[in-house]
């Protein structure tokens, strides 16, 4: 059973009595508070926002005992519900993890300020000076599941980029997230910013998600889902506001005929097995037929020897008896497990065609010493992240130098790839004249 199915099949903790009531009214109140806070936060100085982030980090440290008590209650409920050990690990907090959360908030304060950054500037023949300037998106709603650290990460990223956040935690992390959100609000207040700039939905009722997806009467500008496929699919299907998300991370490593074998092996093992449950994990290996005689068997053996199940095409089945047959569904599957599909392809065109047919436009890599082949792959593969001679596990905002990310987006509008503070900004035009009128 997958982690997601285990969550869906588990018993849910009943909501406390004080969570009952009119969810729609509750959510619309949060929306109005967020919209009112957005103007103050969007026009606040970088120094004031950074002071708030520093105060948040300190509040997280000071409230550590209360956060850990709440987390122990969440963990007890999760264990009683029979949730998987991997899920429990994502939910669990301890002193070290809490310190890492606090330090991450402090690190976000140290990032360059994106608000007001001049993205482009030019002068027209009539003397008008045009500037394209970064501005906050406004109200960002983040819907997440088990990881309580998302409360701090999302809240801090939104504040740094001049936005406000409405956060909807999963039922399983509700108590932990609530305590973390309280610390974040204490940091806001200490810097003179409205507490409504970071609000956690104070209800486990799933109807709250539906209200967010409707846009809360125009108060929500964008929705970011962080969780399993069922959550992301629901958000993408029902949202009436823009969404930053990816549904699948069906990522490929293509070993081209000019690939160095040792490099290909190291990249493949890392891409697949460093962390199998992350969205940047490789799920399919494509091996060029021109190098199958030298590369296919050792690459497959390396995977199998590391405890990774291999599902392969006819050529792959022939190189190792431990390989099992791959079906059509395997080329489309995001396993998030120690399983990989392996296929041989007759060349670069076939590799690109396979990725276009079966991929999810998330992250794909080519391993080759042929610069011309790499250039074509990077130009023609339509994914948010394309790598040459590097692991797909670099699909992470921190690895991009963004400091952190609120998620990864595979859509083609506005943000694509890791969504950090710059991607949480839109832009406006400032036009400077000296009395010009249009003829």
Image: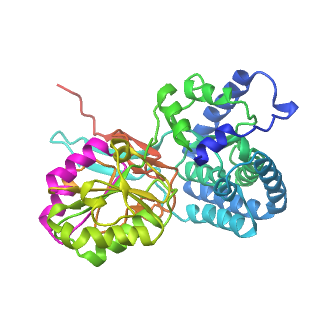
Residue drawn at 45 percent across, 45 percent down? 425
Query: For this rendering, which residue is in front, 173 or 339?
Result: 339
The residue positioned farthest toward the front in the image shown: 321
Question: Can residue 400 be seen in this snapshot?
Answer: no
Question: In the image, residue 73 lies at what x, y percent?
Answer: 83, 51
Question: Can residue 116 be seen in this snapshot?
Answer: yes
Dominant SS type (magenta): helix
Instruction: Identify whether 391 is placed above or below 22.
Output: below
Residue drawn at 29 percent across, 50 percent down? 120
Residue 171 placement: quadrant: top right
Instruction: Identify whether 240 is placed above or below 44.
Output: above
Question: In the image, residue 170 lies at what x, y percent?
Answer: 68, 42
Numbered range of the magenta stretch = 348-377
Magenta includes 270? no
The residue positioned farthest toward the bottom in the image shown: 262
Question: In the image, residue 143 lies at what x, y percent?
Answer: 60, 40
Q: How many marks?
A: 0
Query: For this rendering, which residue is in front, 38 or 272?
Result: 272
Residue drawn at 48 percent across, 67 percent down? 307
Instruction: Identify whether 268 is placed above or below 341.
Output: below
Tell me: 56 left or right of 229. Answer: right
Query: For this rendering, which residue is in front, 133 or 234?
Result: 234
Quadrant of the rendering where the C terminus is positioned: top left
């Amino acid at each position: 059973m997958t982690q997601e199915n285990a969550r869906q099949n588990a018993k849910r903790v009943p909501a406390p009595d004080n969570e009952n009531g009119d969810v729609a009214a509750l959510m619309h109140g949060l929306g109005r508070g967020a919209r009112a806070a957005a103007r103050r936060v969007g026009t606040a100085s970088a120094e004031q926002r950074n002071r708030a982030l520093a105060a948040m980090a300190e509040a997280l440290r000071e409230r550590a005992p209360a956060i850990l008590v709440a987390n122990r209650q969440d963990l007890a409920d999760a264990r009683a519900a029979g949730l998987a050990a991997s899920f429990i690990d994502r939910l669990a907090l301890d002193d070290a993890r809490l310190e890492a959360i606090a330090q991450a908030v402090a690190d976000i304060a140290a990032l360059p300020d994106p608000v007001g950054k001049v993205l482009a500037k030019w002068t027209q023949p009539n003397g008008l000076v045009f500037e394209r300037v970064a501005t906050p998106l406004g109200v960002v709603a983040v819907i997440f599941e088990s990881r309580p650290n998302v409360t701090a990460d999302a809240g801090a990223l939104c504040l740094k980029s001049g936005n406000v956040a409405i956060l909807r935690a999963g039922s399983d992390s509700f108590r932990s997230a609530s305590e973390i959100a309280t610390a974040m609000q204490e940091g806001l207040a200490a810097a003179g910013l409205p507490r409504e700039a970071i609000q956690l939905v104070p209800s486990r009722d799933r109807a709250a998600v539906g209200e967010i997806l409707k846009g809360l009467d125009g108060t929500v500008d964008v929705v970011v889902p962080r969780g399993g496929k069922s959550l992301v699919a629901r958000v993408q299907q029902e949202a009436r506001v823009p969404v930053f998300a990816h549904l699948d991370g069906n990522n490929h490593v293509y070993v081209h005929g000019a690939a160095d074998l040792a490099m290909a092996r190291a990249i493949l093992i890392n891409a697949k097995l460093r962390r199998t449950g992350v969205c940047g994990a490789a799920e399919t290996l494509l091996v060029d037929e021109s190098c199958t005689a030298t590369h296919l068997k050792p690459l497959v053996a390396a995977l199998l020897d590391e405890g990774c199940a291999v599902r392969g095409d006819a050529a792959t089945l022939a190189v190792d008896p431990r390989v099992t047959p791959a079906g059509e569904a395997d080329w489309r599957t995001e396993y998030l497990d120690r399983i990989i599909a392996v296929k041989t392809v007759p060349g670069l065109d076939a590799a690109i065609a396979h990725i276009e047919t079966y991929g999810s436009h998330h992250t794909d890599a080519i391993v080759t010493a042929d610069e011309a082949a790499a250039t074509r792959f990077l130009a023609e593969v339509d994914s948010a992240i394309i790598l040459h001679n590097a692991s797909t596990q670099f699909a992470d905002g921190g690895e991009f130098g963004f400091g952190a990310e609120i998620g990864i987006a595979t859509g083609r509008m506005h943000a694509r790839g890791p969504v950090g503070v710059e991607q949480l900004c839109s832009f406006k035009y400032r036009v400077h004249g000296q009395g010009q009128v249009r003829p």
